[in-house]
Image (cartoon, helix red, strand yellow):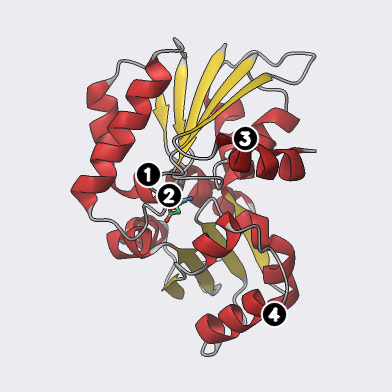
Amino acid sequence: MRLGLFDSGVGGLTVLKSIKEHKLFDEIIYYGDTARVPYGTKDKNTIIRYALEAVEFLKNFEVDMIVAACNSVSAYAIEEIREHINLPVLGVIEPGVKALLKRDAKPKDHILILGTTATIQSQKYERLLHANGFLNITALATPLFVPLVEEGIFEGEILDSTMRHYFKDIKDPDFIILGCTHFPLLKDSLQDYFPNSILIHSGEAIVEHLQSNFDITKSSNSPTLKLFASSDPDGLKRVAKLWLS
Ligand code: DGL
C-alpha cells in the first residue's frame, strides 16, 4: 500500500517517522509545501486551497490513502479534501484526542494545547475535549516555534526565551497536546521545561489510529520513502536525514 503524506514543511516528518518505525505501508510519498510555510498564519480559504493543491500533487503517485500531517489543515480542510478525492483521508486532530483518552487522562486534568494560530482559532481540539468531558483546558497559539523548527533550531537560547515568553502564565499541565506536527521536534526542550507533563505526539496518535481502524499491510521492511518539497528539497532531505535516522 502507498501512503501520501503532506505538511506545510518539515513538521510532517514527525508523523512520517512514527509510521516508518511501525513499518506501516510499503511506500510513503511525502510532500512539504516549504515554499509557502507557515500555513498556521493563513486564513481558512487559503489553507483549503493549499491543501487541495498538495493532494493533487500526491494523486500523481496513485496513493491509496492520504494523511494530512498538519494540524492547521486538519482543523480546516479535511472535509474539503474528502469531497475532492475518493480515498481515505485522515487528519491528526481526532487521533490526537483519542491518544490522550487512551493515556487515561481524567476530566479534571489540566490539558495544554499548543498549536498554530489557525489551529487554536479553529477551537477544534477544545470542542473535542469538551465533548469528552474535559473542563480544564488551556489553548495556546505558539506560532514562533514553527520557523524555529524550519531553521533547525530544536534547543538552546532562542528556543528557551521563546518558551519563557509563551509559557510565563502556564501552571503545571498534566498533558500537553503537541497540536502542530512541527512541535515533536522540540519535544526534549518542551519536556525539560515541563518535566512533569505527558506530551501527546500526533505521529504516535496516527499510528494508533491506523492500526486500530484500518487493515494496513505491515511489511517486514521499512517503507520506501519519496520526499518532495515545493522549495529547497535538499533542505527538507537534510532535516529528514537528521530526524529519521
Ligand atoms: N505543521 C503544521 C501544523 O501541524 C503547520 C505549521 C505551519 O505551517 O504553520 O499545524
Tag in front: 1 or 3:
3
The image position of residue 130, as x and y in percent, is 37, 63
Q: Which mark is residue 74?
A: 1
Q: Are marks 4 and 1 in contact (CB under 8 Å)?
A: no
- Residue to which mark 4 is pinned: 157
- Which mark is in front, 4 or 3? 4
Q: Identify the residue under disc 3.
A: 16
Mark 1 sits near ligand 1, with its Cβ under 8 Å away: yes
Q: Is residue 81 above or below residue 129?
A: above
Earlier residue among tags 4 and 2: 2
Question: How much space separates mark 4 and mark 2, taking CA atoms?
Answer: 27 Å
Q: Which residue is mark 2?
A: 71
Q: Does mark 2 have its CB less than 8 Å from ligand 1?
A: yes
Q: Nearer the viewer, residue 7 or 171?
A: 7
Tell me which amino acid carries mark 3.
Leu
Label 4, label 3: how far apart the Cα atoms are: 28 Å
Please determine whether, in this image, residue 9 is positioned above or below residue 23: below
> Element at badge 3?
helix
Q: Are marks 3 and 2 in contact (CB under 8 Å)?
A: no
Q: Residue at x 63, y 55 (%)?
A: 184
> 84 or 161: nearer the eye?
161
Residue 220 visible to an observer of this rendering: yes
Q: Quadrant of the C terminus?
A: top right
Q: Amino acid at mark 4?
A: Glu
Mark 1: amino acid: Ser
Q: Residue at x 43, y 73 (%)?
A: 140
